[in-house]
Every structure is written in structure tokens, then in C-alpha cells.
Image (spheres, rainbow, N blue to C red):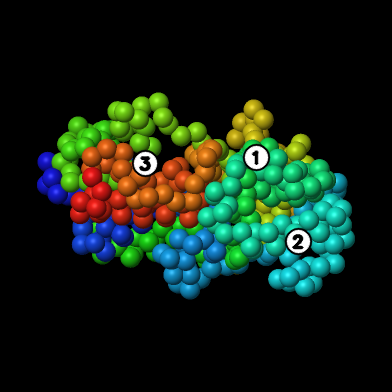
């Protein structure tokens, strides 16, 4: 039985790492209980043979307020993705982008057959609206679905089907655009204020950097928790740990008795990786397949650290196909769209819990709201919105809530 003053964090994902950082700053030496053998949760890069692959295609929006607060962008050596996309539609491909950032994008964007001139003027109006609108205002607005929002704004079905659906389906991991309009506006604003980036060493470098900032935190890997109460933690091994406070970043519904049945719904996807020889998809550019009959939603090509051309393909709906069938069909679609020469399958990630499926999205809350019961605090993007920013914010708030409770700021 550990000391009753020991502070624990359940889960070594982004929320847990931020919580540990904040607790260390206040003089605590937290202990992180992680059931796997590594940090990062969903934000990891793993080895597959001699390849280092992100668990799913993930980007860091460098405009995220919490990412600016906690990350050293220079040390991450961020690769910027092109501020646009290549859209494959009707056996043709169009490159579109923001001409205010890259003037040579003006003509191809204006002439691309993905919507009318009126649609493209509305995009400029939407850009201007999001520049003026604060994040607080975004999350205070009434929620509708993203699809309703786009239609209410006056966009045609053509630009919705050929651009907004494939692009934001890849972000929200659902093709119907039923995700909250708050999330749409927030993500749209972040794209307008910064860039989509990927650390040169992979998305897992974010988790590694946050871990390396910790000086006194202890990590206990392979430590699976089965129950949490106001005064103890019970491990799967039946070992009991007394605590003076615990922050739960994992699925609390399976760990805390009074949250039984309150689990989170999740969106899933499959990310397939290939080594290729040549492609018509420009490097560091997202490719969008604007055909609902195809399996692939988006493609991303890059050159790895030893010069190999790698292509990731993300699939959102499996249509009852086996993984073997999906892999074969995706290879066929890559050949059809990308004009590749040789193509070698590296491996797949089927990510069952890729993004939380949430409504009533929030940006932040009072630290006291993170307290579930005496000495037990909750963190995780599931509490606010499905984003790296929310994961960081929730870890910060849970740590602050625990510290304020201990200092008697709230009862």
C-alpha cells in the first residue's frame, strides 16, 4: 500500500503527460500507471520492420493554443503540409489551395471543378468570418451538424460533396458530417491561423517530448487498473494502492463504479501504409477521393528519413470487407488514382478508438468541474472535444483541480 499522499495518474497519453507536468511544477512526484508498455496513447509512432509509422495519419495543427503552450516546435522539426489538397473526382484531379498563402494556387483553385465561383467566394467569406470569431464565441454558439452548417451558409452540394465531405470526413472520421458545427469552426479557424504539420520523427515525437520534460514522475508500465475509489486504486493483479489524489485519463466508466454504463462512443478507421515508386500526388499534400463508392478517404505521401517514398491511405468504412480484401482494394485504388509504379504493402493499423464521438462540445471548463468525487479527477479529450488541444487542456485542468482541492480553494 503506497502512501496516502501519493498522487497517481491513470494513463500515459497526452492528458496524463500534461497533468504530470503541471503536478511536477507544483512540487509533486506523480506516479503514472499505464497498462501498455509505452507513453502516448493514441499519439504514437511504432516500428514495423525497418519502417517507423504513425498509428494512423495524424497531424498537429500548430495554431492549437495548448500545443503552443506545451510544445517546442523547433525541436520537433515540423514538416508543414501544403495549404491545400489534391482532389480526385470524375477520373480527373484538381489541386486547390489558399491563394492568400500561395499565390500560384489562385488559378488552379478558381478553375477547379469542385464548385461554382459563388461557392469559392463563400469560402473567402467563411475565412473572414473565422478570422473575426474568437474560440470562446465558437464554443458558445448553438450546435448543428457540420452538414447543416455548410448548407445554411449557402454552399452547393457540389462543393460539399467534392471538397468539404472528403476533407472533413478525414478529420472527423465520419463521412456524413454529423460532427458538431463547433468542431468544424474550431478546426477551420486553426487551419486558417496556422498549418497542418507532422514532426519529422513522426507524431509520437510529441509524446516523447512531453515525457522528456518530466523530471521526477515515475512510470509504471504494464500496470492495469481495475477500480478507483476516493482512497485507493486496485490493479488487475489485486494489488491495492492508497492515494492522496488520482487523475483518471483512461475510460473511467470501467474503473469507477458510479460511472458504469457511461462509456464513450468511438469512431474508428483503418490506416494502410505502402512503399511506392512514383506518384502524381505531390509530397506533403493530402489527396482526397471524392467518390463515396471508393474505400479510400484520403492519401498522404512523404519521403521517410532514408529516402523511401511512403504513402498512407485512410479508410473510414469497411463495407463488410476483411482486412485482406480492404488491403487489396486499396492497392487497386492507389494504382487507379495515383499513377504509381511499384507498390509494396508495409502494414495496417485498425484503430478502434481513433476519435471520441461527442456532442455538446466544450473548449474548456472550471478546474473544479474535473473532480468526479473526493480525490478523484477526470481528464481526456472525451470531456471536451476530440483533439490534441482538448487532451492537453483536460490534463491541465485536472491537475489544477487537484491542486486547488488540496489547497482548499474549493470544497
Q: Earlier in the sequence, mark 1 or mark 3?
A: 1
Q: Secondary structure at mark 3?
A: loop
Q: Position of residue 87 (x, y in %)?
A: 77, 53
146 or 346: nearer the viewer:
146
State the image quarter where residue 178 is shown: top right
Q: Position of residue 77 (x, y in %)?
A: 51, 71
Rendered position, 308 above or below 324: below
Q: Secondary structure at mark 2?
A: helix
Q: Position of residue 348 (x, y in %)?
A: 56, 44
Rendered position, 303 above or below 382: below
| 188 relative to 390 in the view: left or right | right
**2 vs 3, front mark:** 2
**Which dot marks residue 145?**
1
| 390 relative to 179 in the view: left or right | left
Residue at 59%, 47% in the rendered image: 141
Q: Earlier in the sequence, mark 2 or mark 3?
A: 2
Quarter in which the N terminus is drawn: top left
Q: Are marks 2 and 3 in contact (CB under 8 Å)?
A: no
Rendered position, 236 above or below 125: above
Residue at 37%, 61% in the rendered image: 210
Residue at 21%, 57% in the rendered image: 29
Task: State how far apart marks 1 and 2 are (Cα).
Answer: 21 Å
Pointer 2 residue: 124
Q: Earlier in the sequence, mark 1 or mark 2?
A: 2
**1 vs 3, front mark:** 1
Residue at 13%, 45% in the rendered image: 4
Q: Are marks 1 and 2 in contact (CB under 8 Å)?
A: no
Q: Secondary structure at mark 1?
A: loop
Pointer 3 residue: 250
Q: Residues within 10 Å of mark 2 (few under 14, many from 20)?
A: few
Amino acid at each position: 500500500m503506497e502512501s496516502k499522499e501519493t498522487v497517481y495518474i491513470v494513463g500515459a497519453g497526452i492528458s496524463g503527460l500534461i497533468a504530470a507536468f503541471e503536478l511536477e511544477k507544483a512540487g509533486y512526484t506523480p506516479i503514472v500507471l499505464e497498462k501498455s508498455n509505452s507513453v502516448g496513447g493514441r499519439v504514437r509512432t511504432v516500428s514495423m520492420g525497418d519502417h517507423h509509422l504513425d498509428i494512423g495519419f495524424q497531424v498537429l495543427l500548430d495554431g492549437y493554443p495548448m500545443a503552443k503552450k506545451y510544445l517546442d516546435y523547433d525541436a520537433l522539426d515540423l514538416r508543414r503540409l501544403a495549404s491545400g489538397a489534391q482532389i480526385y473526382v470524375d477520373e480527373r484531379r484538381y489541386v486547390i489551395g489558399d491563394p492568400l498563402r500561395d499565390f500560384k494556387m489562385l488559378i488552379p483553385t478558381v478553375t477547379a471543378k469542385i464548385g461554382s465561383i459563388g461557392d469559392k467566394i463563400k469560402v473567402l467569406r467563411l475565412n473572414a468570418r473565422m478570422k473575426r470569431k474568437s474560440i470562446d464565441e465558437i464554443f458558445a454558439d448553438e450546435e448543428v451538424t457540420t452538414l447543416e452548417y455548410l448548407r445554411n451558409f449557402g454552399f452547393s452540394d457540389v462543393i460539399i460533396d467534392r471538397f468539404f465531405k472528403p476533407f472533413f470526413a478525414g478529420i472527423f472520421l465520419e463521412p456524413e458530417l454529423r460532427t458538431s458545427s463547433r468542431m468544424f469552426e474550431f478546426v477551420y479557424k486553426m487551419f486558417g491561423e496556422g498549418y497542418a504539420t507532422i514532426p519529422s520523427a513522426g507524431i509520437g515525437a510529441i509524446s516523447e517530448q512531453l515525457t522528456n520534460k518530466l523530471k521526477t514522475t515515475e512510470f509504471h508500465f504494464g500496470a492495469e487498473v481495475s477500480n478507483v475509489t476516493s482512497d485507493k486504486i486496485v490493479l488487475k493483479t489485486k494489488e491495492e494502492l492508497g492515494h492522496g489524489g488520482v487523475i483518471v485519463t483512461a475510460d473511467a466508466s470501467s474503473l469507477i463504479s458510479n460511472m458504469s454504463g457511461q462509456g464513450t462512443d468511438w469512431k474508428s478507421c483503418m490506416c494502410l501504409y505502402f512503399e511506392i515508386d512514383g506518384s502524381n500526388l505531390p509530397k506533403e499534400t493530402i489527396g482526397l477521393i471524392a467518390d463515396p463508392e471508393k474505400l479510400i478517404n484520403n492519401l498522404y505521401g512523404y519521403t521517410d528519413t532514408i529516402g523511401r517514398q511512403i504513402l498512407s491511405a485512410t479508410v473510414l468504412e469497411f463495407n463488410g470487407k476483411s482486412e485482406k480484401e480492404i488491403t487489396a482494394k486499396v492497392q487497386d485504388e492507389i494504382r487507379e488514382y495515383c499513377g504509381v509504379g511499384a507498390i509494396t504493402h508495409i502494414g495496417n493499423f485498425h484503430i478502434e478508438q481513433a476519435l471520441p464521438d461527442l456532442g455538446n462540445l466544450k473548449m474548456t471548463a472550471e478546474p473544479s468541474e474535473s473532480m468526479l468525487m473526493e480525490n478523484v479527477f477526470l481528464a481526456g479529450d472525451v470531456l471536451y472535444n476530440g483533439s490534441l488541444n482538448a487532451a492537453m487542456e483536460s490534463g491541465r485542468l485536472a491537475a489544477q483541480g487537484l491542486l486547488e482541492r488540496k489547497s482548499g480553494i474549493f470544497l
